[in-house]
Amino acid sequence: MSNSSREALRKFFVLGYDELRTRLIRRLGSVELASDALHDTWLRIDNARPAGIVLSPKHYLLQMASNTALKRRSTEKRFVTLTDAKMAIGLVDDAPDPERAAIARSEVEALARALAELTPRRRDILLSSRLKCIPLWAIAERLGISQRLVEIELKHALAHCALRLKRKVIKRFGPKLSEGSEAEQDQI
């Protein structure tokens, strides 16, 4: 292709860009694909080698952009996204969506406020028992109090946090009671 033909294509491309884009969007059904194809076409004008003289730059550029878009589509179809692959093999993304993440952050903040309201001993007993998994007898021994007092303090700490978080206290230890029993809700 001669330099004058390339210049003519470049000039028509710049002047007729909106029309080319509109026609490509209609033809391809995608604004993004049409824009990408036109970008690639602009870059390929220098390497274009038409068989003869370009009689209609508009049609030549439109066909060039369409071919580029079709090539891009076929290339993209060969690749599988990570999401597609996970869905195909049955993996589910367990990452929380933004809404669930925001709710979780606010609950953690509410728990931190509730823990700050506890007495130091109750906070220590709750964190030692629930986070560090230290047996109640060991906590009692460390604090120099009875295991029964540790159980009572733990029960009060759990009730306080449950009240602040608007949750029910979940029973963790003690005898198994029948389902729906009111006594079960009152126990730790």
Image (tube, rainbow, N blue to C red):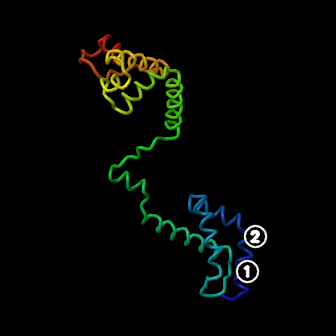
Compared with 133, 170 (above or below) is above
Residue 175 vs residue 61, the one in the foreground? 175
**Amino acid type, label 1:** Ala
* Residue under the point 49% across and 41% down: 97
Q: Position of residue 82 (x, y in %)?
A: 42, 56
Q: Secondary structure at mark 1?
A: helix
Q: Position of residue 93 (x, y in %)?
A: 41, 46
Give the residue pinned by disc 1: 8
Compared with 114, 42 (above or below) is below
State the mark number for residue 15. Answer: 2
Q: Earlier in the sequence, mark 1 or mark 2?
A: 1
How far is disc 1 from disc 2 in space, using C-alphas? Answer: 10 Å
**Amino acid type, label 2:** Leu
Q: Say few, some or many: other residues with alpha carbon within 10 Å of mark 2 (under 14 / 14 to 19 / 20 or more).
A: few
Judge from the rendering whether residue 8 lies leftward or rightward of residue 122; answer left or right.
right
Residue 29 vs residue 81, the one in the foreground? 81
Residue 71 vs residue 174, the one in the foreground? 174
* Residue under the point 53% across and 25% down: 116
State the mark number for residue 42. Answer: none
Residue 132's image quarter? top left
Quadrant location of the N terminus in the rendered image: bottom right
